[in-house]
């Protein structure tokens, strides 16, 4: 099977920013006791699952480079988030995070890494490791850098300003569907 056939055989993906989309952005969220879920998050992810999408979280986590928490803390938080949402019937397929920040204070993380948004590295890495069909895929973020990362990966980005995530996802899916459905 050629690369084009494999890409066609895949399915689209929804790339969701974490802080500000999945949960409220309360500044450097390193532990689960600080998580405040966005309204409608579990239903929004279920909606994406039911629509046949991979659901990926992609997030800059400069708190690692700044010394606020460790990569183990980030991974443990993501495992907890994944389990918590799964208990509500919402499946997150994978996570990518970038712990790097050029102005941080922790050696080994002080660079402008290709995964750091607004660069598309996290999205491209997920597309490389999963059978993602680019056509129909999209990203949702709460910052311009999320939208720029999506554009850099060749997919549309939608700016979420808070509120009911499920209602927002329903509108995005309707827009994506109308954009990819051929007209008679």
Image (cartoon, rainbow, N blue to C red):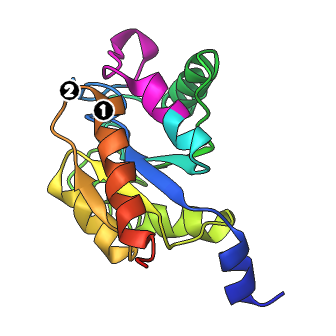
**In x, y percent, where is residue 122?**
46, 61
Give the foreground label among 1 and 2: 1
Residue extending furthest toward the right: 1
Image position of 134 with respect to 27: above or below: below
Image position of 165 with respect to 114: above or below: above
Image position of 69 with respect to 33: above or below: below
**In x, y percent, where is residue 42?**
48, 24
Q: Are marks 1 and 2 in contact (CB under 8 Å)?
A: yes
Q: Which residue is at the front of the view, 84 or 28?
A: 84
Residue displayed at 61% across by 66% down: 132
Residue displayed at 67% across by 65% down: 129
Q: Secondary structure at mark 1?
A: helix
Residue extending furthest toward the top: 33
Task: Report the side of 45 relative to 22 (left or right).
Answer: right
Determine if residue 98 is in view: no
Residue displayed at 45% across by 77% down: 182
Residue range highlighted in magenta: 30-46
Determine if residue 143 is in view: yes
Q: Quadrant of the C terminus?
A: bottom left
- Residue carrying label 1: 167
- How far apart are the two marked residues, 1 and 2, measured between alpha carbons? 9 Å
**In x, y percent, where is residue 8?**
67, 77
**In x, y percent, where is residue 167?**
30, 32
Residue 38 shown in magenta: yes
Snapshot quadrant of residue 131: bottom right
| Other residues around mark 1 within 10 Å, as few (<14) / some (14–19) / many (≥20) | some
- Residue carrying label 2: 163
Residue 163 shown in magenta: no
Task: Report the side of 51 relative to 9 (left or right).
Answer: left
Tally the numbered discs. 2
């Amino acid at each position: 099977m050629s690369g084009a056939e494999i890409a066609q055989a895949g399915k689209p993906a929804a790339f969701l920013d974490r802080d500000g989309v999945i949960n409220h952005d309360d500044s450097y969220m390193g532990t689960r006791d600080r998580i405040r879920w966005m309204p409608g998050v579990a239903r929004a992810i279920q909606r994406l699952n039911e629509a046949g999408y991979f659901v990926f979280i992609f997030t800059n986590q400069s708190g690692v480079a700044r010394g606020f928490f460790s990569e183990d803390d980030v991974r443990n938080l993501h495992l907890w988030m994944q389990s918590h949402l799964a208990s509500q019937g919402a499946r997150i397929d994978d996570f990518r995070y970038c712990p790097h920040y050029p102005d941080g204070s922790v050696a080994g993380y002080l660079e402008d890494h290709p995964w750091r948004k607004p660069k598309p590295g996290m999205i491209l890495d997920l597309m490389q490791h999963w059978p993602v069909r680019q056509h129909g895929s999209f990203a949702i973020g709460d910052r311009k850098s999320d939208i720029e990362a999506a554009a850099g990966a060749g997919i549309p980005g939608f700016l979420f300003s808070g509120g009911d995530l499920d209602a927002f996802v329903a509108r995005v899916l309707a827009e994506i569907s109308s954009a990819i459905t051929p007209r008679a």
